[in-house]
Every structure is written in structure tokens, then in C-alpha cells.
Amino acid sequence: MPFEFPVRIYWEDTDAGGSVFYANTLNFFHGARPDWRGARGIEQQKLREATGGIFVVSETTLKYLRPARLDDELVVTAQLAESGRASITLVQQARAKMERTPEGQALIHCEGTIRIGWVDAATMRPARMPAPILEALK
């Protein structure tokens, strides 16, 4: 079951055409990830202090399916798709909170994958993720 994070579309999220500016979808996805980690007991600053490592986004792939507009309420999801010793991949979606397809599924505005690497915070070089962190993310 994916983690869910509520988002409401405000004026500053939209472009001149009245739709969510495409880059803001990345901000919505980014906003969901700390809460996804936090729900697993992992906080970035405490992690850095304890291990000297941090998570950084290394790759994104997004597919925009339909525009979201001012005052829309979305649910941004995050779900682990893959994990390795130095990175994880999440699948994320921005879904309509209320609107449904004829089959009863939430309308998807955007979906994508986000690859997140583990790096040494001092050097910003890739490193092996500590086993307890990797296990907590599963």
C-alpha cells in the first residue's frame, strides 16, 4: 500500500494557462518523500548526524497525464519499487483526491519514478547505505 500525502493546488502552483506548472509536480513529489521516510522512523538530519550520509535524488522520470488546476485536491503517493546497497527507487503518483474513472479508480495527474542515491555528506560521493536504514525503508 503506498504512502499518501495530501496536496491542495494554490494560485502560486499554477502557470498562465491555469494548470499546475510542470516543475511544481516535482515539488509535490519531493514534499511527500520526507513524510514517507518519517513514517519509517528515518529523518534526514538525524540520519546525517548519526551516519554521515544523506539521500540525494539522482534520476527522475515523469509522465504527465492530465492537468491539475487551482483548488484541486490531490493525493501524492510514494512506494518503494527497488532497493540496492547504494540507492532506492520510488514510484510516485499525483492522484485526484475526489475524481474517479468510470471503474472507480482515482484519476492520475502525473506518475513517475524517482531514484535516490545514498552519499557521504562530506564528499557527496556514493556510499553503501547502512543495512538498518535499508531495512527500515522496505
Image (cartoon, rainbow, N blue to C red):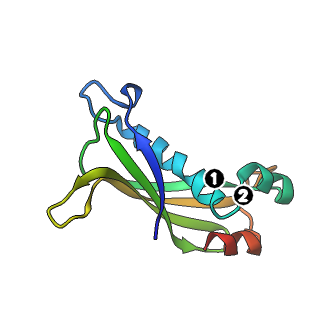
Where does residue 34 sit, x and y in percent of width and height? 61, 51
N-terminal of the pair, mark 2 or mark 1, is 1
Q: Are marks 2 and 1 in contact (CB under 8 Å)?
A: yes
Q: Amino acid at mark 2?
A: Val
Regarding residue 63, the answer to whether it shows in the image is no
Q: Amino acid at mark 1?
A: Val
Image side of residue 59 versus residue 95, left or right: right
Image vertical order of residue 48 relative to residue 103, above or below: above
Q: Please rate how many residues cluster around mark 1, counting C-alpha atoms within 10 Å: few if below 14, some from 14 to 19, many from 20.
A: some
Q: Which residue is mark 1?
A: 56
Can you tell which mark lies on residue 74? Answer: none
The residue tagged with tag 1: helix, strand or loop?
A: strand
Residue 11 lies in what quarter of the image?
A: top left
Where does residue 40 sit, x and y in percent of width and height? 65, 64
Mark 2 to mark 1 CA distance (whole Å): 7 Å
Image side of residue 26 versus residue 116, left or right: left
Residue 104 lies in what quarter of the image?
A: bottom left
Q: Which residue is mark 2?
A: 119
Image vertical order of residue 30 relative to residue 138, above or below: above
Q: Quadrant of the C terminus?
A: bottom right
Report the front residue among 87 and 20. 20
Where does residue 131 sit, x and y in percent of width and height? 75, 75
Residue at 25% over, 64% down? 105
Q: Please rate how many residues cluster around mark 2, counting C-alpha atoms within 10 Å: few if below 14, some from 14 to 19, many from 20.
A: many
Residue at 70% over, 59% down? 42
Residue at 53% over, 61% down? 115
The residue tagged with tag 2: helix, strand or loop?
A: strand
